[in-house]
Image (tube, rainbow, N blue to C red):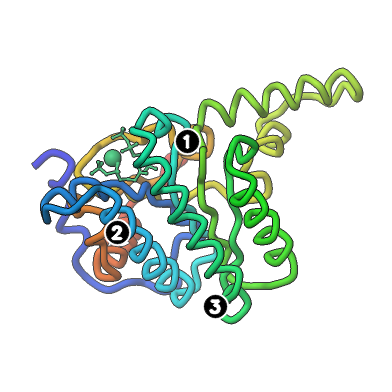
Amino acid sequence: MGLFSKRRDTAGQLDMSKLPRHIAIIMDGNGRWAKKRGLPRQAGHAAGAETFRRIATCCRDMGIGHFTVYAFSTENWKRPPEEVAAIMSLLEKYLHEAIEKMERDGVRLRILGDTSVLSPELRALIAETDELSRHITGMQANICLNYGGRDEIIRAARAYAEKYRETGEPLTEESFAGYLYTAGIPDPDLIIRPSGEYRLSNFLMWQSAYSELYFTDTLWPDFTEEELRRAIISYQHRDRRFGGIK
Ligand code: IPE
Ligand code: IPE
Ligand code: MG
């Protein structure tokens, strides 16, 4: 039982008046999904990219304001170069298509992470995506790419130190948050981790301080709208106290 003992909380109806403002997902389990089918790992990543499209659309249709996914971590460079290359090429393909459809889809895309080390092709696509996103409205979908929570905090600390030398700006939780990749984005209310792992793997370390966590054994490529609804229903049963009492 343990983590799943409260799973009966996923029964019942979704309350559309109590939706999370921001949902974040660790898109994990692509490799195991492929292995189960005797396919190469990259086939799992391709299937996972399709799931992203599907679930982002569900979130948009429900009226979720912010949707953030973990696509590639600062630790994922440890993988074989062929796998890293396959993931990067999928991301390129995805951004190409997304740029064409962004306006029609009503999804503003942003890439969060250290993009400076990515290929010039990918960086050009990211710049184009940013430019386009500025002019359209709709749900904001953030793709964390070469993202690490600790790396983000270190970078923010360096940027703050530099600013401090010029302006003496005092450091507060609010002002520090303005130096993170997620500046201006509300903290995630709900973080979903598929694939049966119970960890955050360096995802949104600062921002997750009071996030509600939802774990499921489903592998990301198999994740469905139904599962998303179950996660949101579970979230809606939680008592968020933020350290206070009720
Ligand atoms: C998540 O799936 C995608 C990335 C980390 C890029 P994995 O590739 O980690 O899949 P598993 O965990 O090996 O099944
Ligand atoms: C987390 O998954 C990173 C992404 C989904 C992008 P990993 O597969 O890298 O995490 P660990 O290694 O199991 O913690
Ligand atoms: Mg994994």
| Image-quadrant location for residue 116 | top right
Above or below, 152 against 89 in this view is: above
Please name whichever residue, 73 or 88, is drawn nearer the observer in this view of the structure: 88
- Mark 1, Cα crowd under 10 Å, few <14 / some 14-19 / many 20+, is few
Q: Is residue 75 shown left or right of residue 124?
A: left
Please say if the residues under marks 2 and 3 sit with CB atoms less than 8 Å apart: no
**Percent of width and height locating residue 34:** 19, 52
Q: Name the residue at 44% across, 37% down.
A: 73
- Could one spot residue 200 in this view of the protein? yes
Q: Amino acid at mark 2?
A: Ala
* Percent position of residue 134, x then y: 73, 64
Q: What is the count of numbered marks?
A: 3
Q: Nearer the viewer, mark 3 or mark 1?
A: 3
State which tag comes first along the sequence, 3 or 1.
Answer: 3
- Residue 215 seen in the figure: no
Numbered label attached to residue 49: none
Amino acid type, label 3? Asp
Q: Which residue is mark 3?
A: 105
Mark 2 = which residue?
Answer: 231
Measured Cα–Cα span from mark 2 to mark 1? 19 Å
Q: Residue at x 22, y 50 (%)?
A: 40
Residue at image point 66% right, 31% down: 173
How far apart are the two marked residues, 2 and 3, measured between alpha carbons? 24 Å
Quadrant in which ligand 1 is drawn: top left
Q: Mark 1 is on which residue type?
A: Ala
Disc 3, SS: helix
User: Is 173 left or right of 166, judged from the image as shown?
Assistant: left
Decide: few, some or many residues near mark 2? Use Cα within 10 Å; few <14, some 14-19, many ≥20: many
**What residue is rendered at 71% in x and 28% in y?**
172
Q: Which residue is mark 1?
A: 209
The answer to whether 57 is drawn above or below residue 8 in the figure is below
Name, please, the residue furthest toward the front: 82
